[in-house]
Every structure is written in structure tokens, then in C-alpha cells.
Amino acid sequence: MDQLKLAALDEDDLKVISAHVQDALMQIGDIDYSPARKWFLVPMNRFVREGKRSLFRRKYERRRSVLHFEHVLSVRSTGIDRDNIKDVLSLLAIRFIPGDAPAGTIELVFAGEATIRLDIEFIEARLADLGPAWETASRPAHFA
């Protein structure tokens, strides 16, 4: 499978990226925000959903990926202890809440009622796989 590279410039594009990063795992200490550059980076281990599986071959994979947001004005979080940098977050979804167009808020919603909110000037995000996939025996409980 080729490495995934996606870009989002509107809410519909962001929904596509959200589908691909559902159940991604990341450590709190890896998340990075640069107010001067107005970007927010989320390195993650993405659960690969686009791979082919069959009845007799139930192979699950993860890939090292990075999610990158541009034009970020501020970042807020709830339910996250930023001092515990080794804690792992499980991403459930990415949502866009419109503000004064084209501005708004992007919410990264995690398991355990944790959320990161990015106040943005407008939507510009990229998701890129950084290397080869590796096999994992575990899969999200809700994955069919």
C-alpha cells in the first residue's frame, strides 16, 4: 500500500482526514504548537483502514503519520494533563465549528472526554504517512 498524503482546505476535506485518523494513537509530549509560525503538529500512529482484508486474512496495520494544521491562532485543551508527556491519547474524530467565515475552531476529540481546540483563520491541514506500515494484532473494539 502506498503512503497516504491528504490535504484539507474545507470542512468536507477535513471529514475525509478525520476518517483516516480515527483511532490514531499519540503521546501528549509529541504534540507541538508554534504560535510564531501558526502551526500545530500531531505525530501519531495511525490505524490503517484503507488496507484490503479478507475472511481468512485479518491483518491489521499502523503507520507513523503526522497531522499538520496551518493558520492556528490559539490552542486550548480539556481533559489532558500536559505534564504527563508519556500519556497516550486515542483520537476519535476531528470536527470543524464555523466562526466568522472562513475562521472557526477545529476540535480534536479523544477517548476519555479529552479535547484539543484550535482556533484557526481558515482550514488548511495535511495528513502524511512517514514510513512503512507495521502489523498489529490489536484493533479498535468498534472496528468491523
Image: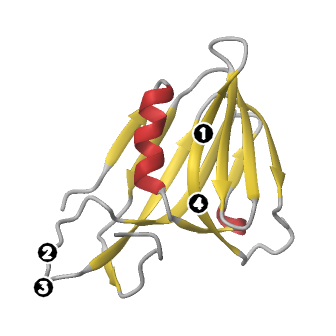
Label ID, residue 91? 4
User: Mark 2 or mark 4, which is nearer to you?
Assistant: 2
Residue 122, percent from left and from top: 61, 21
User: Mark 1 or mark 3, which is nearer to you?
Assistant: 3
The residue wearing badge 1 is: 95
Q: Nearer the viewer, residue 111 or 74?
A: 111
At x 60%, y 39%, the residue is 95
Label ID, residue 56? 3
User: Mark 3 or mark 4, which is nearer to you?
Assistant: 3
**Dot 1: element:** strand
Query: Residue 63 vs residue 9: left or right?
Result: left
Q: Is residue 140 above or below residue 3?
A: below
Q: Are marks 2 and 1 in contact (CB under 8 Å)?
A: no
Q: How many numbered dots are placed on residues in this image?
A: 4
Residue 132, percent from left and from top: 29, 69
Would you identify the image quadrant in which residue 47 lies?
bottom left
Q: Amino acid at mark 4?
A: Leu
Q: Nearer the viewer, residue 73 or 80?
A: 80
Q: Quadrant of the C terminus?
A: bottom left
Q: Amino acid at mark 3?
A: Phe
Q: Are marks 2 and 3 in contact (CB under 8 Å)?
A: yes
